[in-house]
Amino acid sequence: MDGRHPKNIDPRPKRRKDQDNPYEIFTTGIESAEPHYFLSFPNGEGVARCIEISKAVFEAFDRFELDDISYMHKVDRHYERSEQTEESINRRAIQPQEPIEETISRRIEIEALHRAIARLPETQQRRLVLYYFGELTYSQIAEMEGCTIMPVKRSIDAAIKKLKIFLS
């Protein structure tokens, strides 16, 4: 570089480069009437060299860099899709999926709970389901059944005790 123009900030964004890409292109005096285009690279001895190139050559190198970046993105997406492990899928998920062992265990517990509830007397079943699954209060259930709050509370408490025995 001959130093005629200070090295302006290149308006192109910093690009990702392939590890085998030894050169760098840049411009100087880009906002002047006569911009200059340069190619920087290490020679065979590893010494950095810089030569001025024409705009057409600069544009060819620029296009090559863009094509190279596009190819690297395609390769990355290919690797990402071909290496589908449970961990990589969960990392990208909005809500990570629980392991299959936990899902099966939870389903078994739910089925056991349903079987235990089915063994309760009909009144306790109904009140327990309304309270826990229907999210009604004791007073709402009592009003529905035409009784006071205490029988509803006792019935639900008794149902819970029986469920603990059935599930233990």
Image: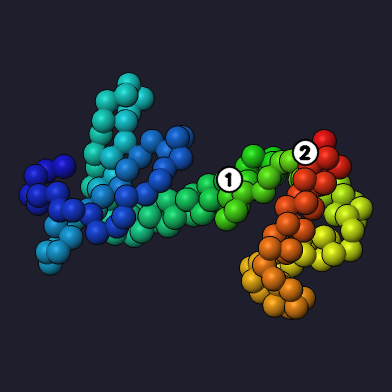
User: Can residue 80 be spotted in the picture?
Assistant: no
Q: Along the line of sight, which residue is nearer the eye, 37 or 30?
A: 30
Image coordinates for residue 77, horizontal then vertical, percent? 60, 50
Image coordinates for residue 12, horizontal then vertical, percent? 29, 57
User: Can residue 37 be spotted in the picture?
Assistant: yes
Side of 44 relative to 30 (left or right)? right
Q: Along the line of sight, which residue is nearer the eye, 119 or 67?
A: 119
Looking at the rendered structure, the secondary structure element under dot 1 is helix
Residue assigned mark 2? 101
Looking at the rendered structure, the secondary structure element under dot 2 is helix
For image coordinates 83% across by 40% down, the residue present is 165
Q: Residues within 10 Å of mark 1 (few under 14, many from 20)?
A: few
Q: Along the line of sight, which residue is nearer the eye, 164 or 42?
A: 164
* Image quadrant occupied by the C terminus: top right
* Image quadrant occupied by the N terminus: top left
Task: Tell me the kind of residue under disc 2.
Answer: Glu
Q: Earlier in the sequence, mark 2 or mark 1?
A: 1
For image coordinates 24% across by 42% down, the residue present is 51
Side of 74 relative to 56 (left or right)? right
Residue assigned mark 1? 91
Side of 23 relative to 125 (left or right)? left
User: Gap between marks 2 and 1, in whole Å?
Assistant: 18 Å
